[in-house]
Each structure stands twice: as C-alpha cells, then as structure tokens.
Amino acid sequence: MPTSWLLALGGGALIGAASALLFLTHGRIAGISGVLGGLLPPAAPDRAWRLAFLVGLVAAGVAGAVVAPSAIGASVRPLLAVVAAGLLVGFGTGLGSGCTSGHGVCGLSRGSPRSLAAVMTFMATGAATAFVAGVVS
C-alpha cells in the first residue's frame, strides 16, 4: 500500500489533469461551486456537461467507498453540523466568487490575480484557525 503522501500526490495529479482536460475540451473552469451553480435556477444552457461532471464526482466517491471504505471513514461530526458547514461553505463561495478548487487549482494555473488573493486568504485563515484550535485544545 502506498504511503499517504503518494496517495495525496496521485490525487492532486488527477485533479489537475481533470481540470486541465475540462478546460482544454470545453473551455470551462472546474470550480465546483460554478459547475453546481450553473445547474441551479436560472440554469445555464450548458447543463449536460455540468451534470456529467457532478455525477462523476459522486460516482468517484461511491467507488472509493466501495473499493477502500477505510480510506474514507465515517464523519466525526453529527449530520446537522455537516449540513450547516456545507451551507456556510456555499455562502462563502458566493462571497468569494468561487471555491477553493476554482481559485486554487484552476485560477492559479491561469495566473488569475483574484485567485491568488483568494488562495492567500484561504491559507492565512486556515493557518490562523489551526493555530487557534491548537492553542484552545
């Protein structure tokens, strides 16, 4: 079994390849909030690829859970907390004009200054949160 850093490297390479492939074949950015947002009312006219992309994400998660269930594991938080966190993330992607995947993977690779500012904010906030959580606990 490969070590965790090899799995992370492989996963990152697959995410990068998938986002590059979507951009090269469809001229679209693989930011999940934008892909999902195009399916919500008022729906974008290019629903087919968006739906296929999201179905592929879910199918990959299901396949991972079937093939290696211990790699995913159960949530350590109650379902209500997970739903609340998801709603907050959705609200944040609206405020930030995109999500971490859109800015971090796709925006930075295109040299977007807005994405650079967003990723720097994500990282600083994450570092501050980790520091505070470490001090508090």
Image (cartoon, rainbow, N blue to C red):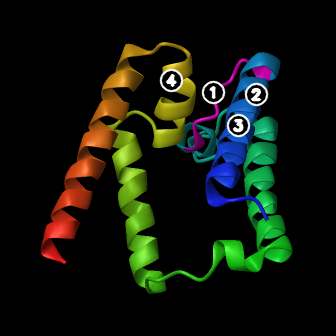
Viewport quadrant of the N terminus: bottom right
Kindly indicate whether the residue at mark 1 contacts the one at mark 3 (C-beta within 8 angstroms): no
Q: Amino acid at mark 4?
A: Gly
Give the alpha-carbon distance from disc 1 to disc 2, as whole Å. 7 Å
Task: Name the N-terminal-most of marks 4 and 1.
Answer: 1
Crowd around label 3: few <14 · some 14–19 · many ≥20 (10 Å): few
Crowd around label 1: few <14 · some 14–19 · many ≥20 (10 Å): many
Mark number, residue 107: 4
The boundaries of the magenta stretch are: 26-32
Q: Amino acid at mark 3?
A: Ala
Q: Residue at x 75, y 78 (%)?
A: 69
Residue carrying label 1: 29
Please, what secondary structure does the residue beneath circle 3 have? Answer: helix
Residue carrying label 3: 13
Q: Where residue 65 sits: x, y (%)?
A: 77, 73
> Could you tell me what secondary structure mostly forms the magenta stretch?
loop
